[in-house]
Amino acid sequence: MKLVTEMVASLGDKYSRILDKQSYTRIQKFDLIGVGATLMPSSADKRIMVGAPPVAGSPADKAGMKYGDYITAVNGVPTEGRTAFDIIDQISNDDPNAKTVTMTVLTEGPDDLKGEGYVRDLKLDRQFEQIVNPITYKVSEERSSASSAVHKVGYIQIKEFNSLVERGLRDAFIDLESQNVDAYVLDLRGNPGGAFQSAVEISSLFFENQIATYVVDSNGVELPFKTAKGKVVVDRNDPVVIWVDGRSASATEVLAGSLRDNCRAVVMGEPSFGKGLIQAVYGLKNGSGLVLTVARYVTPNGDDIQGKGIIPAISGNGIVPPSFVPGLKSDTSRIDFGNIKERLSSKMCKVPDATGGV
């Protein structure tokens, strides 16, 4: 293990590292399926497989799922020709609050032909109960003036991008929309990020079939990720402000760049951290994990996040309250939503071309 650690250190990348068993288990709070298994396409034929040993003690581990097993169906829907993102979307669309998921698992023996082997359906519990919902929200103010651009403002804080963030945020928006909220502030200050897929899923709550981000690999190949169809819950006419600071990083910056470039939000506050590198997490046979930088994020308009961050369009001085004062941090009263609406209008903001995408 010492040799592997030294080899990773020789890469000179502060984000690539070895995780001990405890750290690898903790990072599974970003598992969007909730069964402790990493799904990925096989390098040979792109079939969905278990790409790492399941987390010790997880539902997948207890059910006997092994590294190298193929997942041929999820909740009865074949996985052929689909990606892990497609499967996450399917589970979310079926029932994001479902307590179980059924996976059809194929174990191929050394003498089996492709598709042959031991097949069984495993009904797995989804374990999210130990993960804290990262969403807090409320109606922060009502503006009674007839000349006001908006009348009810919803304040939402997102503390991190874990496996509960999309469903928690969806529920918050549905509740606030039912209360006739017509403007929003997303407080992403101090949010270190998490699962990048969550940033794409959250973007789907605002707009559909548009590019949320690009992932650029080490060879310079650009892979665009698009928002899903039919998942929008926020009224298109509701202006959105995003608060960021120097501790807003990674998936947080992906979301801010996505909503900004697609003319759904104006970023306000301080420049974000600038962590635009993507790490893949690989489970090792001894139960530990390997984290390697494999790509970087680029916003829909082509802005590189790494080392630069998301630069706010409006400084937070005199507008954004301090984040460390509980009673004041949700004060949205100084925001000029008339100006925000103007900045988001088609006259001042152009949505990028959505050609391509996954």
Image (cartoon, rainbow, N blue to C red):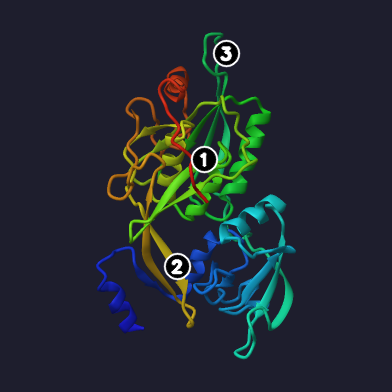
Relative to 24, residue 249 above or below: above
Picture quarter containing residue 178? top right
Residue 353: where, in percent of width, then height? 45, 37
Q: Residues within 10 Å of mark 1 (few under 14, many from 20)?
A: many
Marks 1 and 2: which is nearer the front? 1
Q: Residue furthest top?
A: 146
Q: Earlier in the sequence, mark 3 or mark 2?
A: 3
How many dots with numbers?
3
Disc 3 to disc 1: CB gap under 8 Å: no
Q: Earlier in the sequence, mark 3 or mark 1?
A: 3
Question: Where, quadrant-wise, is the N terminus in this rendering?
Answer: bottom left
Front of the two marks 3 and 2: 2
Residue at mark 2: 281
> Foreground mark, 3 or 1?
1
> Dot 3: few (<14), some (14–19), or many (≥20) neighbours within 10 Å?
few
Residue at the spot 33% in from the left edge and 42% down from the top edge: 303
Q: Amino acid at mark 2?
A: Val
151 w.r.t. 294: above or below: above
- Which is nearer the eye, 128 or 267? 267
33 vs 322: above or below:
below
Crowding around mark 2 (Cα neighbors within 10 Å: few <14, some 14 to 19, many 20+) is many
Between 177 and 308, the one nearer to me in the picture? 308
Q: CA distance from mark 1 to mark 2?
A: 27 Å
Q: Which mark is residue 144?
A: 3
Amino acid beneath label 3: Ser
Residue designated by label 1: 210
* Real-space CA distance between mark 3 and mark 2, rounded to the nearest whole angstrom: 50 Å
The percent position of residue 98, horizontal first and vertical second, equals: 72, 56
Q: Sequence-wise, which precedes: disc 1 or disc 2?
A: 1
Identify which amino acid the numbered label 1 is placed on.
Answer: Gln
Find numbered disc 2 in the image and state the secondary structure of the residue it sits on.
Answer: strand
